[in-house]
Amino acid sequence: MTAISVEQAMGGGRKEDAELSSCSAVGASDHYVQPCWCEDFLMPLSEGTRPSAKHTEFVSPKLEVCDFEGRGRGLRLAVEAVAGEVLLVERCTFECGSGAALRALAQGRGASAEASWGAVPRELRHRALALQPSTDEPPEKVCGVVPLRAWARLDVSQAEQQKQHQGLPSAMWLGKAALTNAMAVATLVENSDGLRSVEALGASGGALFALGALMNHSCAPNASRIAFPGWLVMRAARPVAPGEEITMSYIDVRKPLHARREELRSKWGFVCRCERCALEEAVWSAKDAEQVSRHWERFQEMLARRQCEEADLARIVSETSRLTDRALERHLASCGADTAGESGDSEASTWRRLVREATGLSSDQRVSLCAGREPKGQ
């Protein structure tokens, strides 16, 4: 499950919106007219209707398609992007319906091949044909670097003829491609406290966005995306440097390491080795990881009930924070011990002193440090 506030969904950032309005849309020579996030996306959610179809697609000219070693095909930036900058507004390629209907389609049951493939607009079919149909079949490699705008406008005829010559696409092929690449569609959820949030739940149905599906996964993604009914909106979650890969999260990244890796392995067939996973693998001991997992399970039970006692939640946060601090201290001390063997006692002593100072801060001192202020007192 992915949950964000209504304010986050609206995106804020008038500066980025102004920059967006000066960019050209895919296949258009005129300036791109930016959607109104509240009117075109959020209001329809609250009214139970589909987002407005009056706006057009937008693909940032900064986005490129290329191969990444060990990760396959993905997207990267040719030019720096600022936090909050809109990178992609994409029309849905194929609406998958419920998870059960999608699984039936992937198994060759349910809708006919003609009806399923006919539901994909012709101008979008080449995008679907370029997708990976299952985790067992690696996608075709990209020759060099291709601007995503050019990729989005590739001629459909040659690719489509080749697939049809092989007896594809069929309903089963399309179902497998969607099962591997589809995103959960956002809904507006009314919480027990009266607040509303935009949440993407698998039970809400899925949608295939063939350009957005080119993004690879990271447990510390640099892009945020919301799959509205019929439309995908993707923004830079932080400043992104030129040449940096654009990543999104396939799963709920609040999960502990072993739970994230197990879900990714079972659904997409890979073990995540992003920087965050590598750090957590080095930091967590088996005992601490087990305790953190128990806290996560308790938190999941609260989410399932959509209610919790404040004291219980505070206890989970406090205990998890304590375990995290202890694991980091142990890891940093271990790094210092490694340094001692290589650099001599003097440098090791300095390292240990710095570690003690860094990990000995109070909660108020840590807040000050994170806010860019000098920590005061002890």
Image (spheres, rainbow, N blue to C red):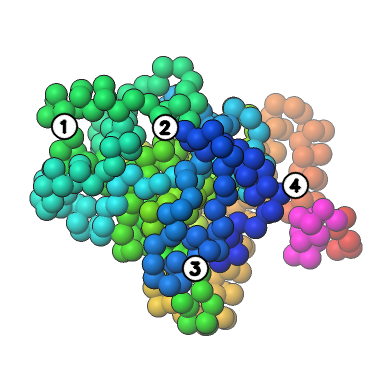
Looking at the picture, tell me which residue is in the foreground, 148 or 183: 148
Q: Which residue is mark 4?
A: 355
Q: Dot 3 lies on which element?
A: helix
Q: Secondary structure at mark 2?
A: helix
- Given contact means CB atoms under 8 Å apart, are the residues at marks 1 and 2 in contact? no
Question: Which of the two marks, 1 or 3, is nearer to us in this view?
Answer: 3
Circle 4 or circle 1, nearest the eye: 1
Image coordinates of residue 367 in percent, x first then y, are: 76, 61
Q: Position of residue 214 (x, y in %)?
A: 41, 36
Kind of residue sitting beneath label 2: Ala
SS at circle 4? helix
Q: Which label's residue is closer to the chain start, 4 or 1?
A: 1
Whether residue 185 is situated above or below residue 48 in the rendered picture: above
Residue name at image x 23 percent, y 28 percent: 160
Query: Tags 3 and 2 in contact by the CB under 8 Å rule?
Result: no
- The answer to which quarter of the image holds residue 154 is top left
Image quadrant where one finds the C terminus: bottom right
Find the distance from the CA under tag 4 to the CA under tag 3. 50 Å
- Is 226 displayed left or right of 339 in the figure? left
Which residue is denoted by mark 3 in the rendering? 43
Residue segment shown in magenta: 362-373
